[in-house]
């Protein structure tokens, strides 16, 4: 595992919400939700999960790392595509159970494995009472 380790969350709510110690609250599977946006224009690029190792590697290298729930393995974003996510800033929410990564995407700028800039390329709408997907141009 990476050289960075995280302390357990404090028992006092005020220390968690107002303190200066980053103590991420991983879920029962050891994961934290990561919301990823473009650092320049704020476009939502993806939502992923990180375990402690992925979060530590991201902090150490400045390149986004995630935990693949489907493959049960660590992965560096852009490892095969060249579209690495260079982290500009990491924020956490008030109870430290989610992180927000602001990134600049290298390579061709695609984040989605389909080659699109964002994984959020479809909208959900109701047609005749059924939910349908529409591709966003």
Image (cartoon, rainbow, N blue to C red):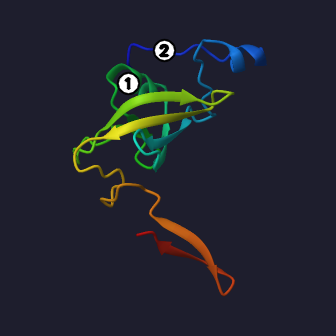
> Which residue is label 1 attached to?
57
Q: Residue at x 71, y 21 (%)?
A: 17
| Residue 35 rendering spot, x and y as whole percentages | 52, 42
Q: Residues within 10 Å of mark 2 (few under 14, many from 20)?
A: few
Q: Secondary structure at mark 2?
A: loop
| Residue 76 rendering spot, x and y as whole percentages | 32, 37
In the rendered structure, the answer to whether residue 33 lies left or right of residue 120 reads right
Gap in angstroms between the C-alphas marked 2 and 1: 10 Å
Answer yes or no: do the residues labelled 2 and 1 have beta carbons within 8 Å? no
Picture quarter with the C terminus:
bottom left
Is 66 in front, or is 129? 129
Q: Residue at x 76, y 16 (%)?
A: 14
Q: Earlier in the sequence, mark 2 or mark 1?
A: 2
Residue 81, compared with residue 7, is above or below; it is: below
Q: Residue at x 63, y 34 (%)?
A: 28
Residue at far bottom of view: 128
Q: Residues within 10 Å of mark 1 (few under 14, many from 20)?
A: some
- Which mark is drawn over residue 5? 2
Residue 37 visible in the current orientation: yes
């Amino acid at each position: 595992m990476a050289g960075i380790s995280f302390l357990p969350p404090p028992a006092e709510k005020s220390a968690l919400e107002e303190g200066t110690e980053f103590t991420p609250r991983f879920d029962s599977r050891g994961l934290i939700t990561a919301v990823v946006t473009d650092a320049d224009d704020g476009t939502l690029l993806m939502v992923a999960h990180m375990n402690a190792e992925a979060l530590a590697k991201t902090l150490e290298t400045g390149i986004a790392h995630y935990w693949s729930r489907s493959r049960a393995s660590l992965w560096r974003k852009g490892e095969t595509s060249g579209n690495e996510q260079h982290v500009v800033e990491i924020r956490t929410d008030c109870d430290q159970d989610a992180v927000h990564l602001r990134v600049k995407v290298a390579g061709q700028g695609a984040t989605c494995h389909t080659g699109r800039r964002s994984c959020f390329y479809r909208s959900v709408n109701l047609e005749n009472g059924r939910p349908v997907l529409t591709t966003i141009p």
